[in-house]
Image: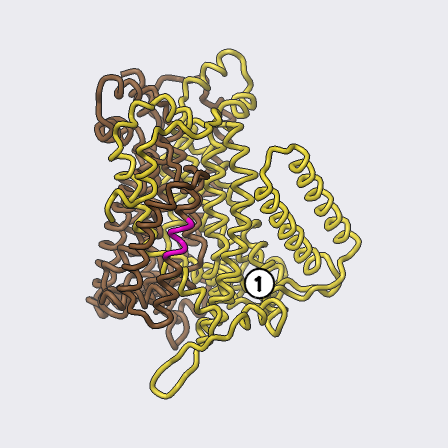
């Protein structure tokens, strides 16, 4: 799909090299497509065909059937629809919120200098530890935490001012990404207890909040590199012209960052869309999401390959559609145009 | 939270330029030039606090609660479940006791090659530390940190050598996880970078490729696990004729530890290459093409233009992807669990899978202990990576 009117560039490959590039891309396309093709044909197989397999081409070496599709879409009906709607709502909401909050934080980490003092961070950790210990020893949680926050404020305003050593932006960024290290398996039970306290179990709000928090570090890190690579002449000239920082972010930084924003959005959407373990622990019926449905097909009778294939296919369809719609934004030229205009 | 209580806000009142500012990084330069923005104090905290507060709110309690879990044991009393404090018993079991061979592996005397690797590692680490000591630029605390980091690194290499390059040694879940992480990342980075560089060219079906290459990432990891279970089935899977043609009709790769680990790495790579691909693609697309064109017109070779223009621009984001993949990769669970159930034996059991199996058998204490040791291991690896690789590379660029 080359544009015939496109200006020829010195960076373009010569025809033989271009053919080589095309063939390599084609080879990887086959590697990617074949397992998905296999899912596709499996979704039209009867259990018998799967078991006697391998059969490759519908109508040629096996008779396709719509049984699995009927089972998932009609027999299960609402039991498929409910998790599907949940997945869409949770995925879209959490990734939009994570993208907005994360991009702002990333921009701040690139353009401002933060110097949180070591002493104040230490005081904060100490007061939180105090609150947890007090709670564990039987003090009412609310009072313990209120006392800890009060003590922290007073100490920070008095002793805290004497501390000189400070951390920098890269330490904040590292702290953010380090929040992803603890595996979900360790976080799941404490999160269950936490959301039980606020009566949000089996509620999609709990999933949205959790996914925003878990995806924020990824957004911050990806967008931080992206913002740092932008030429700052644009922002400087706008600042000189008297634009406020909000205006600069909204009208200059965000528009020229569209490729990075789109790529990051797709990544966090996919993460939220597919998350399994936390959804498993936090939901029971109403708020279940699609990954749980897929895993549920490995029932007592062994894996139901045909039903699983249908579920995976209908799960990836909207994400792929979104990738098709958004792909054209991941393209060059936007920045160059902005600099000239 | 009232704004005046926050440490960062308090600092925002002082000029942003008081700190010693090494002039190298782009971010710092920008801050210096844009000093006029300091008046917009509100934006400083408005931009960063929502993210920080949300993460704090959701991470503090789990962090503390899982420490508490890791030093206790579930006790089932009639009608209720209690936690009883057991001290470091869970950790002791994993590192020295019953579960040692499962967690750390079976340690044996290294082969001559193993000794050579180990001695080389010790020598390199020691010279690096002495060089830092002599330079006199690092404060005592930094020296202690580097010493501890170096000792941990030597310990880790010792573990690798004693389980892999020794007679009768067997890797435990720590070493298996390291194999998955670094084997997988090397492949994913190579493939992802190569594909991204090809997909920015003006080739036919460009859009099709770029969208298709994303698809593996969109499938839920559990689903990918089952998909590869179908793919790798040697009797009903699509590659059955291939196995037969190779005379391997009754062959099962499931029983060989290294083949099984290879299968896990292949599945992981199939799924995660798109992640590297899309981030590098976005980065490549936002490069200023005209600089490259100008260089090429002026007679630079393609290699030179890659080395001096494309690569420096890609390096920071590449180090970020590698860091994210290290952190995510250590949590690998679905592929080895679904494909092999951690088998043969415990040959493909990653640390998270071990934690999951303990969790499933309601041994929450030991599960949390495994998770915490994972946290320590990844923190060390990530800190070393950030302070040695990423910082250096960012300065280079």
Q: Position of residue B199 (x, y in %)?
A: 43, 33
Tell me: A108 left or right of B289: left
From the rendered image, report the letter of the chain displayed in yellow. Answer: B
Q: Residues within 10 Å of mark 1 (few under 14, many from 20)?
A: many
Q: Quadrant of residue A326?
A: top left
Please, which residue is most extreme toward the bottom here? B78
Measuring 55% from the left and 33% from the top, which residue is drawn there? B392
Give the magenta range.
A122-127
| Vertical relation: A185 (above or below) A23 | below
Q: Position of residue B25 (x, y in %)?
A: 46, 28
**Quadrant where the image shows the N terminus of chain A:** top left
Towards the viewer: B360 or A190: A190
Q: Quadrant of residue A203?
A: bottom left
Measuring 26% from the left and 39% from the top, which residue is drawn there? B46
Please, which residue is most extreme toward the front here? A158
Towards the viewer: A71 or A94: A94
What residue is shown with label 1?
B173
| Vertical relation: B10 (above or below) A70 | above
Tell me: A125 left or right of A261: right
């Amino acid at each position: 799909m080359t544009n015939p009117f496109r200006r020829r560039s010195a960076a373009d490959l010569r025809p033989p090299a271009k053919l080589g590039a095309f063939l390599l891309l084609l080879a990887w396309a086959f590697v990617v497509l074949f397992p998905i093709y296999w899912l596709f044909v499996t979704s039209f197989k009867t259990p018998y065909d799967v078991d006697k397999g391998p059969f490759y081409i519908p109508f040629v070496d096996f008779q396709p059937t719509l049984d699995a599709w009927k089972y998932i879409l009609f027999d299960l009906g609402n039991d498929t629809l409910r998790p599907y709607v949940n997945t869409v709502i949770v995925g879209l909401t959490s990734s939009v919120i994570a993208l907005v909050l994360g991009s702002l934080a990333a921009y701040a980490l690139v353009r401002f200098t933060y110097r949180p003092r070591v002493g104040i961070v230490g005081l904060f950790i100490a007061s939180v530890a105090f609150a947890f210990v007090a709670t564990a020893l039987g003090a009412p949680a609310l009072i313990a935490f209120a006392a800890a926050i009060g003590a922290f404020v007073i100490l920070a305003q008095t002793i805290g001012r004497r501390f000189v050593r400070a951390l920098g932006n890269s330490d904040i960024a590292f702290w953010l990404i380090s929040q992803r290290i603890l595996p979900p398996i360790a976080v799941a039970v404490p999160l269950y207890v936490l959301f039980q306290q606020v009566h949000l179990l089996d509620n999609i709000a709990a999933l949205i909040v959790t996914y925003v928090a878990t995806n924020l570090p990824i957004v911050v890190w990806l967008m931080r590199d992206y913002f740092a690579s932008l030429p700052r002449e644009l922002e400087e000239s706008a600042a000189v012209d008297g634009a406020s920082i909000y205006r600069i972010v909204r009208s200059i930084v965000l528009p020229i960052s569209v490729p990075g924003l789109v790529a990051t959005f797709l990544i966090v959407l996919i993460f939220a869309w597919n998350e399994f373990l936390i959804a498993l622990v936090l939901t029971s019926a109403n708020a279940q999401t699609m990954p749980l449905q897929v895993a549920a097909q490995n029932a007592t009778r062994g894996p139901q390959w045909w039903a699983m294939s249908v579920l995976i296919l209908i799960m990836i369809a909207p994400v792929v559609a979104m990738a098709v719609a958004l792909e054209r934004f991941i393209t060059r030229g936007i920045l160059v145009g902005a600099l000239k205009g | 939270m009232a704004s005046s209580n926050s440490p960062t806000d308090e600092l925002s009142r002082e000029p942003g330029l008081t700190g010693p500012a090494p002039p190298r990084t782009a971010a710092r330069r920008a801050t210096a030039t844009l000093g006029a923005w300091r008046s917009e104090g509100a934006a400083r905290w408005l931009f960063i606090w929502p993210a920080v507060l949300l993460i704090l709110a959701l991470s503090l309690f789990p962090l503390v609660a899982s420490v508490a879990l890791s030093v206790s044991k579930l006790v089932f009393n009639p009608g209720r479940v209690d936690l009883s404090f057991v001290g470091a018993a869970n950790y002791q079991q994993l590192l020295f006791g019953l579960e040692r061979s499962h967690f750390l592996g079976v340690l044996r005397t290294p082969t001559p090659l193993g000794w050579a690797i180990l001695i080389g590692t010790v020598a390199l680490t020691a010279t690096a530390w002495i060089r830092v000591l002599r330079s006199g630029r690092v404060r005592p605390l930094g020296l202690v940190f580097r010493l501890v980091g170096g000792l941990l690194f030597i310990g880790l290499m010792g573990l690798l050598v004693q389980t892999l390059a020794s007679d009768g040694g067997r890797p435990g879940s720590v070493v298996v996880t390291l194999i998955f992480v670094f084997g997988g990342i090397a492949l994913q980075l190579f493939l992802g970078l190569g594909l991204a560089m090809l997909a920015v060219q003006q080739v036919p079906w460009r859009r099709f490729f770029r969208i298709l290459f994303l698809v593996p990432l969109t499938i839920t990891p559990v689903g990918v696990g089952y998909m590869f279970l179908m793919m790798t089935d040697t009797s009903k899977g699509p590659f059955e004729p291939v196995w037969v043609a190779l005379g391997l009709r009754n062959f099962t790769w499931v029983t060989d530890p290294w083949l099984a680990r290879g299968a896990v790495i292949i599945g992981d790579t199939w799924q995660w290459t798109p992640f590297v691909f899309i981030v590098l693609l976005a980065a490549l697309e936002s490069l200023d093409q005209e600089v490259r064109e100008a260089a090429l017109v002026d007679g630079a070779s393609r290699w030179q233009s890659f080395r001096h223009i494309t690569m420096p621009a890609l390096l920071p984001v590449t180090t970020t992807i590698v860091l994210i993949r290290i952190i995510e990769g250590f949590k690998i669970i679905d592929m080895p669990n679904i494909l092999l159930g951690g088998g043969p034996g415990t040959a493909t059991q990653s640390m998270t899978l071990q934690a999951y199996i303990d969790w499933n058998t309601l041994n929450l204490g030991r599960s949390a202990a495994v998770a915490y040791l994972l946290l320590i291991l990844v923190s060390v690896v990530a800190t070393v990576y950030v302070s040695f690789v990423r910082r250096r590379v960012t300065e280079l660029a």
